[in-house]
Image (tube, rainbow, N blue to C red):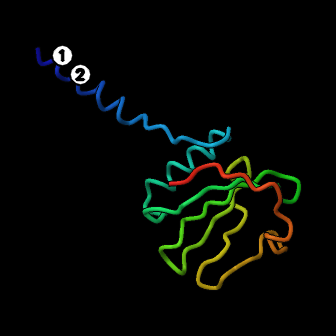
Amino acid sequence: MRTFKVIGLLFIIGILGCEDLDLHEDVPKCIEKKIKEFREAGATCDFGAKVYRYKFQGMEVYVFDPGTCGADMQSPIYDEQCNFLCALGGFTGNIMCNEVIFADYATNETLIWEN
């Protein structure tokens, strides 16, 4: 009987642990993992956090916008292989990425995820 209880508990934990992200687009697995970490690490505001995909300098990049609950929060940017490129915003209000103004070269904005 105890074995059935343990198996049942493990099954319930497994089901609850498989929460779907409800992504708006197909994304690389490593970016999906980054979104889960972003959401669960407390790096986002309770609402208004978003992840966008852009074309930037010939590659697809993902901007992790934490929302507007903190004036000094940064938006990290990763490429398709989850390599960190830069972080926008923050205390200094950084707008540069790879030595250019990100907004001047980023195109094809696509919302991927939001809370």
Q: Secondary structure at mark 1?
A: helix
**Circles 1 and 2: CB atoms closer than 8 Å:** yes
Residue with the mark numbered 1 = 4
54 over 23 or under it: above or below: below
Quarter of the figure with the N terminus: top left
Question: Residue 69, percent across and down?
Answer: 47, 73
Residue with the mark numbered 2 = 8
Residue at far right of view: 58
For label 1, the crowd category at 10 Å Cα-Cα, with few meaning under 14, some 14 to 19 and many 20 or more, is few
Instruction: Give the quadrant of residue 16.
Output: top left
User: In the image, is 79 to the left or to the right of 105?
Assistant: left
User: In the image, is 62 to the left or to the right of 17?
Assistant: right
- Give the amino acid type for the residue marked by disc 2 in the picture: Gly
Residue occupying image coordinates x 70% and y 67%: 86
Between 112 and 82, which is closer to the camera in this rendering? 112
Residue occupying image coordinates x 53% and y 72%: 68
Question: Residue 13, percent across and down?
Answer: 30, 32
- Give the amino acid type for the residue marked by disc 1 in the picture: Phe
User: In the image, is 6 to the left or to the right of 64?
Assistant: left
Q: How many marks?
A: 2
Q: Secondary structure at mark 2?
A: helix
User: In the image, is 46 to the left or to the right of 31?
Assistant: left
Instruction: Give the quadrant of residue 106.
Output: bottom right
Question: Residue 34, percent across and down?
Answer: 57, 50
Residue occupying image coordinates x 44% and y 58%: 41
Question: Residue 107, percent across and down?
Answer: 83, 59
